Amino acid sequence: MSAQSAPTFESAFPLDVERLIFEEAACNDIRSAVQLALVCRRVQSWVEPIIYRTVSLHTIEIGDGFRRSLEITTKPPSFYAQCVKVLYLPTTSKYWCDHPRTTIKLFSYCQGVEHFVSYGSPFSAIASTQLMDVITVMRPRRLVASLTHILPTNSRFSLPFFDNVTHLEISDLMDHWSTWSGFHHLRRLSHILLPVYDDFGTPFFTPDAVWVVKDLLAHCETLQVCVLCHRSTTDILCGLEEALDPLECIEDTRLVFILMPMDKRSDWRAFLNGEPDTWDYADHVVATQRQTGRRVEARRVHED
């Protein structure tokens, strides 16, 4: 959208009141925000940061549409770097492998992202040097990702990419993250989530995984919550207590157990809607455990 396309109009409200009205309307209905941007140039400047704040490419079609918009936009990269704060990528990795230029351009325009969700892609395939260059310029605060290929060595937690990370949800399975060390390099880490099951969803805990959890709790000075996430089926739950026996030696109220949501996007939607998410629930559990001195039984966050 070019700035010349928006007309001008006179308002009966003071400018600050008028701005609040349009911003509130855009926030309440993001679909109508696009129409509001056509009212006039000054309204366009108010609502466009709201329109572009969240980029959710949850289907290939939406991803293609966003890519095409980048190809024809008259806006400078700095506009997107300033406005795009939340980036959600689809889990399919083939798209990103087959469209490397699209992937690189996407990340180069989203350097200001603070909340980055990528359950499988683009880290599910080994990244090219060029892609790694644009990714590692980012400084997300909340990160949900598979890190296996962005962390080929343990020392990579010291990458500047992780400098601002406070909330980290790792989607790699235990046989990957249980071999990592160097979590103490995450200087601002306050919340971390680790999956504790294998490819078949069976909960288990290896000695290496126990060591990683102990190391996190002992050496991450800013850590407030360590969430261990497992799946839930009848036969799995029967063996859950035995599977988690190795953790009995860890008496730390910051340790929280949850069940994986039936729909992973439920937590994403809760965050977007300003509703309690996994981290809010985990904070509540930690407070309860400190007060009662007992461990809270695992449950799904978004179930009544």
Image: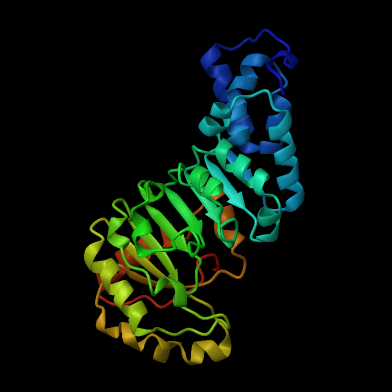
The residue that appears at 46% across and 46% down in the rendered structure is: 136
State left or right for residue 5 relative to residue 182.
right
Please identify the quarter of the rendering in which residue 24 is found: top right
- Is residue 230 shown to the viewer in this render? yes
Between 101 and 108, the one nearer to me in the picture: 101
- Picture residue at 55% right of the left edge, 81% below the top: 201
Percent of width and height locating residue 68? 74, 37
Q: Nearer the viewer, residue 71 or 50?
A: 71
| Residue 253 shows in this picture | no
Judging from the image, the colouring scheme is: rainbow
Q: Quadrant of residue 26?
A: top right
Q: x and y percent of residue 89 in the render?
A: 62, 52
Q: Quadrant of the N terminus?
A: top right
Rendered-image quadrant of the C terminus: bottom right
Residue 121 sits above or below residue 134 on the image: below
Viewer-proximal residue among 217 and 133: 133
Q: Position of residue 204 (x, y in %)?
A: 44, 85
